[in-house]
Amino acid sequence: MSTPSSIKLEPAQNSFLNNLVKENKPFETCAFLLGKKLDDMFIVKEIVPVENVDSSNVRFSIEDEKLLQIYTYSESINLPVIGIFHSHPSEAFPSKTDKFYMELNPVPWIIKSTTTNETRCFILNDYVNNTKSEFTELEIKIKD
Ligand SMILES: [Zn+2]
C-alpha cells in the first residue's frame, strides 16, 4: 500500500489555519488534522488546535493530557489523526526536534513559515519505505 502523494484542505480550513498562526504570532501554532486517507490523498475533515504550553516561538510542547484527549476524540468520531500542522519562525522545513516527533507521529506534517509565508508538507520516508533520515514532500491541495 502506497502513501498518498497529497493532502487536501478546504479553502475555509486553510484560512482557519492561517488565522490561528496570525493570532498566536510570535508563538508557534499547532493543530491536529483529523480525516481520512482516500486513494492518493489525505483528506482533512476536522482541525483541532492545541495550545503551545511552551509559549515559545521556536518550539512547541503539548500536554500529554491534551494529546490523550485529542486521540480519544479522534477515535470517538472515527476520524484518525492524518496530519499535524505547525508554524515556524524560520523556513518551512522540519527541524531536528520535528524529525524526532515525526518518528513518533509518522503522519504528514504541514509546516507554515511565518517569515516567508510558505507552507509545505512532509512525511518521514521511514513511513513510506523504511529508509530513515529523509523526508518526502506531499503536495498541499486547497480545494472544496
Ligand atoms: Zn517545527
Image (spheres, rainbow, N blue to C red):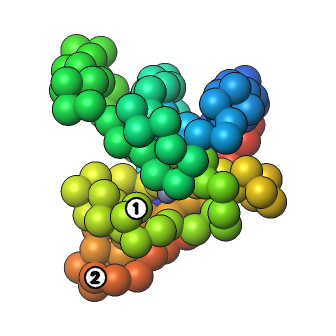
Q: Quadrant of residue 143?
A: top right
Image position, residue 116 (x, y; %)? 80, 60
Question: Vertical placement of 43 versus 59: above or below?
Answer: above
Q: Residue at x 57, y 59 (%)?
A: 121
Asked whether residue 5 is in view, the answer is no
Asked whether residue 69 is in view, the answer is yes
Image position, residue 91 (x, y; %)? 67, 66
**Mark 2 — residue?**
132
Q: Which badge, 1 or 2, is on the more N-terminal residue?
A: 1
Which amino acid lies under the numbered mark 2 shown in the image of this protein? Lys
Question: Vertical placement of 98 versus 134: above or below?
Answer: above
Q: Residue at x 43, y 27 (%)?
A: 50
Image position, residue 88 (x, y; %)? 61, 54
**Mark 1 — residue?**
98
Task: Give the class, few, some or many, for how many residues have Cα within 10 Å of label 2's Cα (few <14, many ≥20).
Answer: few
In the picture, measured across the screen, residue 113 lies left or right of residue 79, that is right
Q: Residue at x 22, y 15 (%)?
A: 76
